[in-house]
Amino acid sequence: TSFPKNTPTRNVTLTLNLNNNKRGDIYSNNFTGRVQGLIGLLQSNDVPIYVRLPSQLVLVKRITAINGNPITNIIDDPNTTEDNDSNWPANYLKGIINGKVKPGDELEYTVYFLSNGDSDSINVKLCDLIPPKTAFLDAGFNGSTPVSGGGLPGANVGIAVERFGTIEYMTSPQDGDKGSYFPPASTPNASCSGTNDNGAVTVDIGNLSRTGFGGTPAAAYGFIRFVVEVK
C-alpha cells in the first residue's frame, strides 16, 4: 500500500493466515515500509504471536471393573490417538476396551475426559449412550459416598464423577444434581453421539481449564462412571 507525500498519519492493518501453523508456533511481525518524501524506514513493533488451539474435548472410554473387581490395566487403543495425548496424567487411563463376559455380569464403564486446547472449555455437558445388549443399573453405586447434594432423598445412586482426585456420586433420576439417567427413547439434556435407543447417562461437568497457554492442568480432566448389566 502506498500513500502520497504529506499524507497524514495512517494505520496499516496486516491480516495473518495461521491455518497451517502448529500449536506453539511463534509468528513475529517484522513489517517495514518507506514513506515518500521522508528519509528512512518505518518499522512496526516486533510483537510475537503465539498460535493457540481452540478448546477441544478428548474422550476415552474403558471398562474399569467386572462384577465389582477393579481393572487397573493401562492399554493403548490402536484405533485412536486420543489415549496418547501428553496431557493425560501418568497411568490415569485404567481399564480395558473389551473382554469375555456373560449375561448377568456387571460392567463398570468409565469415560475419561480432557480439555485439550489453549482456551477453557465452558459449560461442558457429557452424554454417554448405554451400550447395546446391556441395561443401566440405577443402583450401581448405592452405599457409596459422598453423594452430591440436590438429588432426590432416598433415590438410587448410579453415577460417579471424578474431579481433582475426588469421586462424587450422583443419583440416577432426573432431579436436582448434575447427573441423570435417561431411559430409552427419551430425550437427554445433553448432546449425544447417536439416538437414545438403550438409555443414556448425562453429566453437567461445568467449566474445564485449558491445558496450554497458562492453564491449570489439574482442572482440565476427570471422568464419569456408571454400571450396566449384560443381558
Image (tube, helix red, strand yellow):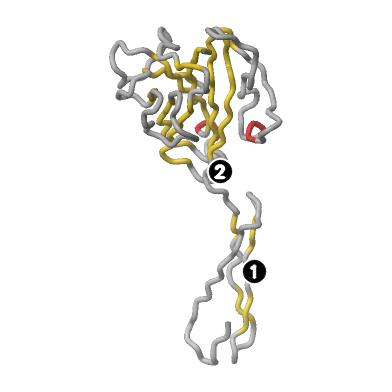
Q: Nearer the viewer, residue 123 or 136?
A: 136
Q: Nearer the viewer, residue 159 or 97?
A: 97
Q: In screen coordinates, is 41 left or right of 55?
A: right
Answer yes or no: do the residues labelled 1 and 2 have beta carbons within 8 Å? Answer: no
Q: Amino acid at mark 2?
A: Gly
Q: Could you tell me which quadrant the N terminus lies in?
A: bottom right
Figure label count? 2
Q: Nearer the viewer, residue 29 or 144?
A: 144
> Looking at the rendering, which quadrant does residue 145 occupy?
top left
Q: Residue at x 71, y 31 (%)?
A: 78
> Looking at the rendering, which quadrant does residue 127 occupy?
top left
Pick out the residue farthest to the left: 153
The vertical placement of 47 against 41, above or below, is: above
Q: In screen coordinates, is 116 left or right of 73?
A: left
**Circle 1 Cα neighbour tier, 10 Å, few/some/many (<14 / 14–19 / ≥20):** few
Mark closer to the chain start, 1 or 2: 1
User: Secondary structure beneath disc 2?
Assistant: loop
Residue 4 x/y as whole percent: 54, 91
The vertical placement of 24 against 38, above or below, is: above
Q: Which residue is mark 1?
A: 30
Residue 204 x/y as whole percent: 40, 31
Q: Amino acid at mark 1?
A: Asn
Residue 149 x/y as whole percent: 32, 20
Question: Alpha-carbon distance for marks 1 and 2?
Answer: 27 Å
User: Secondary structure beneath disc 1?
Assistant: loop
Q: Which residue is mark 2?
A: 117
Q: Residue at x 45, y 24 (%)?
A: 198
Q: Residue at x 59, y 92 (%)?
A: 37
> Looking at the rendering, which quadrant does residue 178 occupy?
top left
